[in-house]
Amino acid sequence: MDSLVEFLVAAFILLGAAFALIGSIGLARLPDFYLRLHGPTKASTLGVGGMIMASLLFFSWQAQTLQLQEVLIVLFLFITAPVSAHMLAKAAMHRGLARRKDTKGRPWKQ
Amino acid sequence: MIRILPFPLLSLLLWLAWMLLNGFSWGHALLGLLLALLLPLATRPFWPNVPRLRNLPRLLRFLALVHWDIVVANLTVALLILRSPRRLRPAFVELPLALTDDFAITVLMSTISLTPGTVSADVSEDRATLLIHVLDVDDPEALVAEIKQRYERPLKEIFEC
Amino acid sequence: MLEIALPVGFALIVLALLLNLYRLLRGPTLPDRALALDTMYVNAIALIVLYGIATDSKLYFEAAMLIALIGFVSTVAVAKYMTRGDIIE
């Protein structure tokens, strides 16, 4: 395998994995639900995005043709991630979950 | 023409998705074409009023901008998460909407949620205000102005006049 | 280079999954658990894609796609249940 492609694949794998981990760190350590919502819905999307880029490069290089299948996963995640985040935020506001005291503004009544 | 192809772009997307899933062969190209024609017709009642896409180059530029912003903002949020959480300044911010079309509003909300640091939490019944939760904000009004300028204006050009 | 990047990638993702598991068990509220589960789905997709690269096989693509589909639908169903007390009204 060409060393440049190998380097790029390795870089995308590490980038993706690092962002997945950072998102999950956010989920584990941030103090209230609304803050936790930020970690996973963001970093995980880029985390998977990086993995998919690595996979695209890897398989395209192996087959020596463009392999775009994996793009479907990213496309699907980018469309659905905001929807699940929105639904979860609505659920949290409906249950009146506590927010950190210094949060400016207030959630709406559901 | 309009009756056969109610949503040409949706048909094109369906066909492309089918081809990506199955790999290229003439048989699948034909089957995909059939599905791309029939599915929009069958699901037509689910789409009461879809806005016309008015400005394709603008849409492509908008998509490029959003992807770039996702990458940049991801780095910012990564730093924010790794720092001490006590230094975060979270806020619920209300954004008055200029968009009127449901689909355009949905796209705006998705954009806001996908760019790290902001999550769109709710939209009011009359579609006039958006509630956004921000991870770390100094000046909420500046943020609202930026979102309106950066995302809402292009969307208005793309979907409405 | 891949022989270093692959194990490191696996380790980071597994660590991420463990952190999600911690949040899933700890809670403290139902939306927190639902969010943790949703994140686990996303991380599992990343893990499967990585496994596909490691084993040099495209077989796992469908598995990743299915998890993406099921994860989304179940998260929305749970969130809907939490807001309305019902899934199909």
Image: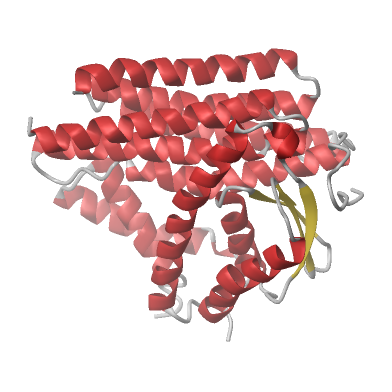
Image-quadrant location for residue C28: top right
Residue C37 is left or right of residue B8, and the answer is right
Q: Is residue A92 above or below residue B90?
A: above
- Residue C31 % position (x, y): 76, 30
Is residue B48 at least partly visible in the picture? no
Of the 4 image quadrants, the one containing the N terminus of chain A is top left
Image-quadrant location for residue C70: top right
Please, which residue is most extreme toward the bottom here? B161
Residue C79 is left or right of residue A66, and the answer is right
Residue C30 is left or right of residue A95, and the answer is left
Q: Residue at x 54, y 81 (%)?
A: B157
Q: Residue at x 60, y 74 (%)?
A: B149
Q: Is residue B112 above or below residue B61?
A: above
Q: Is residue A8 above or below residue B148?
A: above
Q: Nearer the viewer, residue C64 or B21?
A: C64
Q: Residue at x 49, y 16 (%)?
A: C15
Q: Nearer the viewer, residue B88 or A48?
A: B88
- Residue A44 % position (x, y): 51, 35
- Residue B158 % position (x, y): 51, 77
Q: Residue at x 39, y 33 (%)?
A: A16
